[in-house]
Image (tube, rainbow, N blue to C red):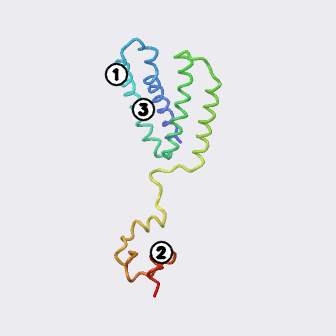
Amino acid sequence: MKSLSVTVLLLVISNTFMTFAWYAHLKNLADQPWIIAALVSWGTAFFEYLFQVPANRIGYGTLSLPQLKIIQEAIALIVFVPFSIFYMRQSWSWNYLWAALCVMGAVFFIFQEPARTGPPPMTAPCAEAVSSPLPGPAATPSSPDRAPSAGTPADAKERKP
């Protein structure tokens, strides 16, 4: 449970940096050339990655990849709404609430499956297919030692006396 808490905390910090990197230039650097805004945003995004990469590495041991992604999206919305209202001075909209409810629905559904670490295990048919050798000439349709199958025109011609 500690790794989940650390993951969420790091993702909150990460998303705060990323939200500023993506949107603060619209307010702070609106009178600057776009290349200046891009460079400042990239510099801010560097700090986002210093928190995001460890968060994903820590969280992936406890959560499945889809669970990790949906948590990140929920946190992004939780960070974005106050940023939008208080920093960018956007007005409140009930659509924020409806969007949050949809994301919370995604969180609910993605956590209905158990968390996995790593790729899913191979099932018996897949493992058998991977470990069996490729079919040889005896398995080809034109092979004389293969029994004809019913239902194809080629098989019907072969069965006529």
Q: What residue did someone put label 1 on? A: 39
* Residue at 37%, 28% in the rendered image: 46
Residue at 39% across / 27% down in the picture? 45
Q: Nearer the viewer, mark 2 or mark 1?
A: 2
Do the residues bearing badges 2 and 1 touch, measured as CB atoms within 8 Å? no
Q: Which residue is mark 3?
A: 51
Viewer-nearest of discs 2 and 3: 2
Figure quadrant of residue 24: top left
The answer to the question of whether label 3 and label 1 lie on touching residues, with beta carbons closer than 8 A, is no
The secondary structure type at the circle numbered 1 is: helix
- Residue carrying label 2: 153
Relative height, residue 124 to residue 23 (above, below): below
**As displayed, is residue 61 above or below residue 24?**
below
Residue 119 position (above or below residue 68): below
Query: Residue 74: horizontal and vertical position, in percent?
Result: 55, 34
Q: Which amino acid type is shown beneath numbered disc 2?
A: Pro
Label located before the other in sequence (2 or 1) = 1
Q: What's under tag 3, amino acid-wise?
A: Phe
Q: Is residue 138 left or right of residue 101?
A: left
Q: Residues within 10 Å of mark 2 (few under 14, many from 20)?
A: few
Lower position in the chain sequence, tag 2 or tag 3:
3
Frontmost residue, 122 versus 63: 122
The percent coordinates of residue 125 (x first, y second) are 48, 67
Residue 23's place in the image compared with 2, above or below, is above
How crowded pointer 1 is (Cα within 10 Å; few <14, some 14-19, many 20+) is rated as: few
The amino acid on which the numbered mark 1 sits, given as a three-letter code, is Leu
Mark on residue 106? none
